[in-house]
Image (tube, rainbow, N blue to C red):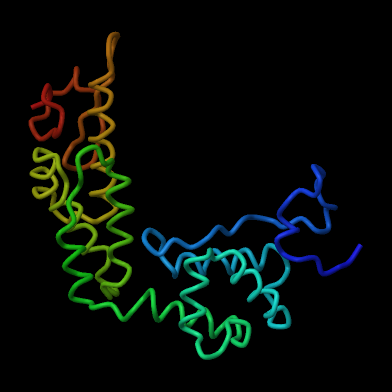
Amino acid sequence: MPTDLPISLLTKQCKGQLLPKEYTLLGVVGPFNPDTDDWVVYSERLEQFFKANGISDPENSEKQRAVLLSTCGNETYLLIRSLAAPDKPTDKSISEILELARDHFCPSRSVIVQCYNFNCRTQKEGETVSQFWAELRRLSEYCEFGNTLNDMLRDRLVCGIRDIKLQRRLLAERGLTFAKAFELAQVAELAEKNAMQPGGAVTIYGVYLGGGIHGYTSCAIPQCFYVDQCL
């Protein structure tokens, strides 16, 4: 059996039977969708695919190029073909192709615009605290916050949280860090979910401003926040 089978054959079944194990690729890199995908993320996944299949070394650059051009999808391939003109994509190295695509899909970002998007982000209806946090982390990637990142994340979390009562309590917390704000927001969210459980005994938690967690039925602390029965 030849040792340099076309890449398309390596990922398909041949007449209903799997190809030998030595020709099986690990992982899948699907086509790139310009409308929904991030080229930086796509190229990072491509790099991991190369490593998983033992072709990440420079001497395998032609194979890397073949994988990219055969899996990126028809629309993206036509775009790369246009960007490479008058040369053919196969006349370019994998690094040159990735750079052409990056310059097209990821033009220089305005830091002000990125910061604006970050500072306008609020928690959406039905969005969990963890999902909100992940989205803030994503939006902060190109804001160049540097050493102030955690402070900016804390401020945006507090300002963008939907629960007004929780927001007031977080604002009253002295020396609030992002980690503490995130922890308290998660506890409050869990308490609300527990309170909404149908039927049976429900365990609801209150949280001291200092961070202690307790059941509301035995609460006698006016500083306890979030749970209505504790206030």
Out of 113 and 161, give the one closest to the viewer.
Answer: 113
Residue 80 is situated, as x and y percent measured from the top left of the image, at 50, 77
So how many labels did they put on this image? 0
Left or right: 80, with 136 as reference point: right
What quarter of the picture does the C terminus occupy? top left
Residue at 53% from the left image edge and 60% from the top image edge: 31
Residue at 17% from the left image edge and 51% from the top image edge: 122
Does residue 94 sit above or below 151 in this rendering?
below
Out of 229 and 85, give the one closest to the viewer.
Answer: 85
Left or right: 228, with 65 as reference point: left
Of all residues, the one furthest to the top in this rendering is 200
Residue 198 is situated, as x and y percent measured from the top left of the image, at 27, 13
Residue at 50% from the left image edge and 73% from the top image edge: 78
Q: Quarter of the image holding residue 225?
A: top left
Does residue 228 sit above or below 182 in this rendering?
above
Left or right: 50, with 119 as reference point: right
Of all residues, the one furthest to the right in this rendering is 1
Residue at 19% from the left image edge and 39% from the top image edge: 125
